Image: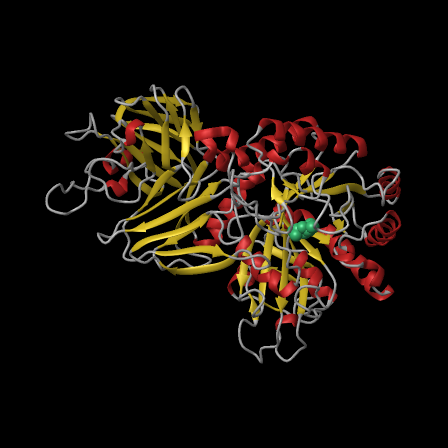
């Protein structure tokens, strides 16, 4: 049983490699100021040890200015003698604050438990939920609140839960920051005493940060050490605060919403927060990432076992200049390369020949496609590819039939400007009529054209985010817009089970474990420069599996950076995820097309290993020094090695592999190292991991941008 009762009002979530121990503290004033505390989170304890770990609470200090240890709580409230970061902050009728919870009961189900608490005076029921499964070290937590009182309750903060880090001599945190074109930049720093907040206020997951953190004792490496990590499964605004108190305690609380807007609960209403996920891993950042990947594949993605097709997308080739003839010309070339999915990007609908008009009018452009898209997509199918389309359902240009008809559908405050970004406004998906409209046309479009794929884009942040019709619950749009987007995606998938969806938001602005529950892959970044992409993909890989990471090969010089990178290098970088092609193929030479076709075929051969295998970040600083990523699936081992700049012999020079059976023998099946690791050569797992191989791309004094693909297969034990 993954959730085990341990002692009175004490339970353990027991995962394959970790234990998460929590319970209701039965102190002197536990009746009116209950504390549900985390007793322990770390390596799995023997069953017999569970009770002893929950035996002696650290004594509370209630004199002088010393804080009580509210940092240990699963959901520290704003109330009573607590001065830490609140996870729950309620404002009752008449401006009353200071939540006072008492314990009601524990409700258990298979693999999960709800601890029910209640603020009796105001009728607020609070459920703390903990769930885990047999095959993952991820512990899932969320909170439900129900207003059983007579007046509305507002929430300043309504987090999914707080996670306590065990005492260690030091604490260091790892996360990602970013911007458009520069998503998921890894950042690792000592955790300062104070409150470190990562947040998005944009209404989306955002580019600036991603909702996860890893904390270690300052001693973890890629391959070793303990790592505690927390992620929030949410696609709207969010906030994650790592609190390092002067007493030494460290806790991480996270939830949807940012400072400012208040969630609102009318009498009789209830609300479930998004899930916060906690994971303990011993085995360094690499093990933590692989555990997240396995969890995402096993418990999040709707269709994790499928192989994602090689896509062609016309955006970088044509921009808004979309025509049937132009698309078919590109399609013919894409099919010649081995592409399996052809996606028509922005510019196919309404009056959309530039970014200032047409968004919201989701019918084929009468000027460009007077007979609809059937002929184009029949042509795509005749070339052996399946069709896909770009859509941006949450957006409208003021210059559109939709906006002229429904100006009230956008986020707005009366008497305030409606600021546009990229000439567009945000449709309020908290409204049921907007959701119904969206599901109607999306379903119609997918049905009419038998679409296999939608790229669901979202190209601006919220501003003037009002919802006048909703009155005092207007701020709920910050939650309910995201709920609405999720609900439309869910309903679309229910109606069209064969449809696959890519999540995009001006590049990688909507990458999270909630959107991945209803999409199949994410657009990682609009920056398709291979060298920049290596850095972005490196940060991406900390949480998200390669089988969700959409990566295109585009033109050289790159349209964004003007950097020239050889075709092979561009392919090898994109082959580290879900390969796509986004270049202007009409400008590629016959030699380039032939080389590309060979690389697409090579990708298809390794695709299951890359998309479904275990990922190892082997060495170097991707994009800056020699580096390599490795994937292992069953007996197959694939390595992609890179060297962007000649480094005059600075290490690494030997490539040491990881994740192999040290006793087994591996045979090289694909290699460009004719002398040092030729095809057919056999190596012991131990030699490969402890000593390593010499690869041509890593040798000094060669040209810039060398890369190579190496594949080995386990052939048995000696
Ligand atoms: C966003 C996406 C791009 C492309 C354009 C189309 O920027 O990230 O990939 O789809 O929109 O307008």
Q: Residue furthest front?
A: 415
> Residue at left 15%, top 41%?
59
* Residue 319 appears in the picture as rendered: yes
Q: Position of residue 140 (x, y in %)?
A: 43, 35
Judging from the image, the colouring scheme is: secondary structure
435 or 615, nearer to the observer: 435
Pick the quarter of the image with the C terminus.
Answer: bottom right
Q: Residue furthest left?
A: 63
Q: Quadrant of residue 104?
A: top left
377 or 425, nearer to the observer: 425
Q: Position of residue 134 (x, y in %)?
A: 46, 33
Q: Position of residue 329 (x, y in %)?
A: 87, 52
Question: In the rendered view, does 703 fall on the left or right side of 368?
Answer: left
Pick the quarter of the image with the N terminus.
Answer: top left
Q: Quadrant of residue 54?
A: top left
Q: Position of residue 321 (x, y in %)?
A: 80, 53
Is 527 above or below relative to 12?
below
268 or 228, nearer to the observer: 268
412 or 587, nearer to the observer: 412
> Residue at left 65%, top 49%?
423
Count of numbered marks: 0
Is 594 above or below relative to 240?
below
* Residue 578 appears in the picture as rendered: no
């Amino acid at each position: 049983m993954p959730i085990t009762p341990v002692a009175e009002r004490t339970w353990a979530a027991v995962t394959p490699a970790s234990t998460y121990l929590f319970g209701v503290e039965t102190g002197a004033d536990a009746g009116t100021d209950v504390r549900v505390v985390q007793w322990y989170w770390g390596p799995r304890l023997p069953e017999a040890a569970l009770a002893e770990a929950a035996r002696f609470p650290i004594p509370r200090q209630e004199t002088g200015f010393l804080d009580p240890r509210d940092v240990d709580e699963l959901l520290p409230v704003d109330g009573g003698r607590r001065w830490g970061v609140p996870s729950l902050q309620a404002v009752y009728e008449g401006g009353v604050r200071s939540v006072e919870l008492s314990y009601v009961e524990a409700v258990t189900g298979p693999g999960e438990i709800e601890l029910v608490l209640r603020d009796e005076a105001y009728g607020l029921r609070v459920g703390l939920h903990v769930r885990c499964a047999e095959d993952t070290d991820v512990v899932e937590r969320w909170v439900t609140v129900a207003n059983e009182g007579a007046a509305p309750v507002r929430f300043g903060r309504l987090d999914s839960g707080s996670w306590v880090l065990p005492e260690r001599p030091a604490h260091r945190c790892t996360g990602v920051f970013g911007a458009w074109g520069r998503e998921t930049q890894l950042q690792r720093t000592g955790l300062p005493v104070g409150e470190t907040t990562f947040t998005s206020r944009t209404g989306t997951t955002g580019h600036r940060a991603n909702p996860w953190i890893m904390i270690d004792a300052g001693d973890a490496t890629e391959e070793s050490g303990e790592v505690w990590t927390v992620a929030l499964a949410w696609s709207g605004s969010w906030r994650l605060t790592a609190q390092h108190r002067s007493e030494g305690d460290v806790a991480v609380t996270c939830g949807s919403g940012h400072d400012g807007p208040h969630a609102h609960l009318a009498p009789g209403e209830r609300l479930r927060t998004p899930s916060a996920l906690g994971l303990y891993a011993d085995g360094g950042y690499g093990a933590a990432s692989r555990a997240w990947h396995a969890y995402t594949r096993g418990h999040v993605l709707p269709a994790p076992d499928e192989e994602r097709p090689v896509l062609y997308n016309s955006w970088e080739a044509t921009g808004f200049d979309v025509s049937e003839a132009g698309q078919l010309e590109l399609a013919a070339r894409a099919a010649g390369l081995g592409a399996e999915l052809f996606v028509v990007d922005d510019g196919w609908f309404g009056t959309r020949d530039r970014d200032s008009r047409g968004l919201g009018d989701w019918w084929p452009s009468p000027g460009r496609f007077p007979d609809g898209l059937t002929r184009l997509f029949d042509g795509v199918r005749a070339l052996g590819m399946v069709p896909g389309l770009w859509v941006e359902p949450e957006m409208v240009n003021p210059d559109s039939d939709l906006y002229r008809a429904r100006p009230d559908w956008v986020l707005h405050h009366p008497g305030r400007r409606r600021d546009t970004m990229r000439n567009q406004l945000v449709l309020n998906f908290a409204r049921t009529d907007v959701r119904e409209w969206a599901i109607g046309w999306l379903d119609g479009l997918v049905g009419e054209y038998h679409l296999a794929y939608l790229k669901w884009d979202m190209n601006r942040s919220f501003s003037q985010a009002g919802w006048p019709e909703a009155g005092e619950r207007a701020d709920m749009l910050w939650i309910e817009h995201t709920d609405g987007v999720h609900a439309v995606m869910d309903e679309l998938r229910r109606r069209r089970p064969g449809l696959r969806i890519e999540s995009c938001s001006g590049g990688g602005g909507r990458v999270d474990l909630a959107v991945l529950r209803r999409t199949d892959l994410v657009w990682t970044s609009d920056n398709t420069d291979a060298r920049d992409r290596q850095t972005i993909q490196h940060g991406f890989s900390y949480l998200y599996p390669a089988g969700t990471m959409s990566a295109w090969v585009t033109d050289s010089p790159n349209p964004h950076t003007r950097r020239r990178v050889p075709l092979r290098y561009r392919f090898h970088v994109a082959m580290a995820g879900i390969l796509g092609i986004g270049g202007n193929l009409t400008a590629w030479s016959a030699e380039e097309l032939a080389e590309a076709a060979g690389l697409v075929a090579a990708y298809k051969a390794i695709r299951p290993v890359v998309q479904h295998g275990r990922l190892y970040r082997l060495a170097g600083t991707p994009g800056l020094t020699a580096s390599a990523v490795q994937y292992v699936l069953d007996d197959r081992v694939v390595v992609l090695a890179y060297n962007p700049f000649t480094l005059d012999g600075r290490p690494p020079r030997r490539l040491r592999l990881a994740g192999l059976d040290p006793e087994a023998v591996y045979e090289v099946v694909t290699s460009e190292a004719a002398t040092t690791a030729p095809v057919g050569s056999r190596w012991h797992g131990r030699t490969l991991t402890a000593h390593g191989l010499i690869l041509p791309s890593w040798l000094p004094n060669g040209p810039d941008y060398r890369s190579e693909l190496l594949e080995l297969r386990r052939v048995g034990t000696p």
